[in-house]
Amino acid sequence: MPPRQGASVSRSSRKARRRGWNALKVLLLVGALAVGGGAFVLYPKWRSGPAAHGSADLTVRYRTDAPATGAAAKPWLEVINNSKKTVALSDVTLRYYFSADDASAYGSNCVQSALGCSNITAKIGMLTGSGPTSGHYLQIGFTAAAGSLEPGKTSQGIGLQLFRLDHKELNQANDLSFDAKSTHYAPSKRVAAYLGGKHVWGDEPSGSDAAAGQGGPLSVTAPAAAAPPAGVMFDDFSYTGPDDPALASNGWQVRTGQGGPGIKDTWSTAGISFPAEGTAKAGQSLQLQVTSDGTAKGTQQSELQTSKPYFFTGTLAARVYFSDKPTSGRNGDHINESFFAISPDHKSAQYSELDYEYMPNGGWGAPGPKLDTTSWRNSTNNDRVTKAQKDKLEGWHILMITAVNGSVTYSMDGRELFTSDSKYFPRERMNIHFSAWLVDLPFQGPRTWDMRVDWLYYQAEKAVPTAEVEKAVKGFSTNGTAYVNTVALPKS
């Protein structure tokens, strides 16, 4: 997936202490020892916001519950319409300014919003002429579906996270919009707001927009993102880790329970991570890691699944990296790298399951490499139809399951692999899973396997060609949309 515009911006190290915000409204030289040298860095010149000269059309209120150092910055922002006119949120842009910790790239996500995180966009940019460490910002926008604010009304709180993609501790002490004392909502001039491209609230640094990562300059006048289509789920896996609150609020859960398949009762959160992905088309990927020393006690398997049965009919796609060999240790394991949809209850009378299972070294007595595509009707009596592709598949692939008009088609990179008929067509909604596990333990000794997922895309009820799936994913990326879920579930 192309990087969300500006989603990976490096920040040079420094130890300069931020002076008072008001003092930054004039040009201020701050002596600071840069890491590895004694260079001075220059803070930008700050311009007073419109409210300094009269009433502002918008007010931005801010709070945080995060300490100065930690896994992530956690700004909560609220937009209030002070004008006498109704304001479309799609015309509103916010900028949260931060400074730098060494050369890490950065990511962000939305944890909670009454507007729906599907309607929040986020990009990371920087300003020229502002020194190597200051002048970075998280730019927040709103899709056309975010609605509008009548005079005097509020967006309510928008919970965001900003974090390093190397997942090292983030230091906010020098972040220009951060205020450790603001643990309750209060107006903050440290966050700038723009309405229709016009600066209407807060103080902003001087300097022009510079290219951010590979995405180019960020604009406050660009058209807002369109409303997300109905019946779509998309995730580019921009998270801090398995305990990220956004992961749960976006409908995912990490498996830790008992049972199989594979080495029973070895499911662990330890293997789930979201590293920076330099070769994939996203700033981050989901990584599912399996580790073992050849004993059941020393084995950890990984699985991530949706917490609700979102998939029924339509097009389900994911960009997945299959591994043919371990990241470390001896090869030879019967590893299973899988992407599948399955009924929440395996005893259901309407049981449905649709699988991709890649086994580079084979398994259950069958040689590898092979990719099994399987449609199940009943798991108890082994009622299924399946077809194997006997190819080495190490690398990135777009896997698709298209379930429409009474048949299920499995395709990889636009090439049809297998079609099952109406007997094995889904009969009920299914959870979506990614899983990496070992069929057995054929030898002793430490080894590690890694499976990765760049993005997930689902369009309910419709057949979508591979090229159109890629186009949709690119569109979300360009807009700064990390997550969408407009799939309507039936009321229970």
Image: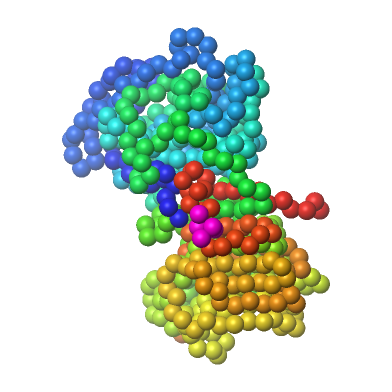
Question: Measured from the top left, where is residue 375 in percent x and y?
Answer: 67, 76
Q: Residue at x 50, y 66 (%)?
A: 398
Q: Is residue 199 magenta?
A: no
Q: How is the image coloured?
A: rainbow
Q: Is residue 147 left or right of residue 200?
A: right
Which residue range is magenta in the image? 467-471
Question: Residue 192: x percent and y percent?
Answer: 46, 25
Q: Is residue 462 above or below residue 475?
A: below
Q: Is residue 257 above or below residue 179?
A: below
Residue 17 in sight here: no
**In the displayed image of the protein, which residue is found farthest to the bottom?**
365
Please identify the quarter of the rendering in which residue 373 is found. Answer: bottom right
Could you tell me what secondary structure mostly forms the magenta stretch? Answer: helix
- Residue 338 location (% of width, % of height): 56, 71
Q: Is residue 37 left or right of residue 269?
A: left
User: What residue is at 63 percent from the left and 22 percent from the top?
Assistant: 86
The residue closer to the viewer here, 315 or 271, is 315
Residue 60 appears in the rendering: yes
Residue 151 higher or lower than 214, as above or below: above
Q: Residue at x 28, y 19 (%)?
A: 27
- Number of residue marks: 0
Q: Position of residue 297 (x, y in %)?
A: 54, 74
Q: Residue at x 61, y 58 (%)?
A: 458
Q: Residue furthest top?
A: 54
